[in-house]
Amino acid sequence: MKRVVNLYRTSIGKKIIMAISGFVFVAFVIVHMLGNLKIFYPAHEGVYKIDVYGEFLRTVGYPVFARGQVLWIFRITLIGLALFHIWSAIVTWLMSRSARPIKYKVVEPVASTLASRTMRIGGVVIAVFIIFHMLNLTTGDIFPGGQFEHGAVHDNMLANFSVWWVTAFYVIAMLFLGLHLYHGVWSAFQTLGVSNPKYNSWRRGLAWFVAILVTAGNIAIPLAILMGKVH
Ligand code: HEM
């Protein structure tokens, strides 16, 4: 245990935490996106597939666990990991800044990409997005689309994304998420020791794949609704 704590104190230890929690988030956003794509299924006998899916999330584990219990375990795990991820990012940033208090006079953008340069601002945008997203589609406290109804996932999504600025906000946030995922997946492998140049092409390929899949899938939903393509 002491060795784990000592490792966490180092900058590489924090990067390992960011990499592992990052992989959990990648798995979550892919599964979440696949679930949300059910919005494109037409209703069967008056029931929307996405509403059934929403209900499944609330009842998973029943009757061993009470309704919503497994979902809460999952939420708490995700929140804990997110706090660790953000905390580790802030501390490594502060550590690298104090290791070099005087800024480089000439900044060489050779090894940096748009994705790597937007990691910090992207992280802030994603954090703001998640808070807004919860208040918007989970609790309905911020719901500019009209009346929020608990459990009516399909109708809530339609009302929500018919408001142009809500859709615009989601689209912008998803573009930042895509950049964050691209650089995150790429550097997580580096942190975990897969840095041999002979693996670079598949690392890059996987990073592109995850980023494009999640961004395109997630952007398609609000845009299709705003354009009136989902009924
Ligand atoms: C356009 C993209 C997205 C759409 C349309 C969307 C849609 C939704 C909907 C409808 C819910 C409520 C589900 C229910 O009440 O059963 C939800 C919950 C949630 N979403 Fe998203 N989501 C999107 C992107 C994201 C992203 C990128 C993240 C994380 C980075 C995320 C994280 C969450 C979380 C943590 C919950 C709460 C689950 C819960 O506590 O019940 N979502 N989302």
Image: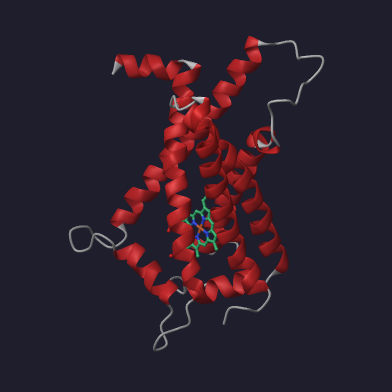
Q: Residue at x 42, y 48 (%)?
A: 27
Q: Residue at x 49, y 32 (%)?
A: 199
In percent of width and height, residue 59 lies at 29, 65
115 with respect to 35 (left or right): right
> Image height check: is 103 above or below 169?
above
Q: Which residue lies furthest to the left in this view?
A: 64
The residue lying toward the viewer, choosing from 191 and 122, is: 191
In percent of width and height, residue 194 lies at 45, 28
In percent of width and height, residue 63 lies at 19, 63
In this orientation, does residue 67 appear?
Answer: yes
In this orientation, does residue 185 appear?
Answer: no
The residue lying toward the viewer, choosing from 92 and 148, is: 92
In percent of width and height, residue 173 lies at 64, 51
Q: Residue at x 49, y 59 (%)?
A: 33
Count of labels shown?
Answer: 0
> Image height check: is 136 above or below 174?
below
The quadrant of the picture occupied by the C terminus is: bottom right
Q: Which residue is drawn at 70% across and 11% down?
A: 101
Quadrant of res 96: top right
150 with respect to 120 (left or right): left
Quadrant of res 2: top left
The quadrant of the picture occupied by the N terminus is: top left
Q: Which residue lies furthest to the right in this view?
A: 105
60 with respect to 192 (left or right): left
Q: Residue furthest front?
A: 198
The coloring applied to the image is secondary structure
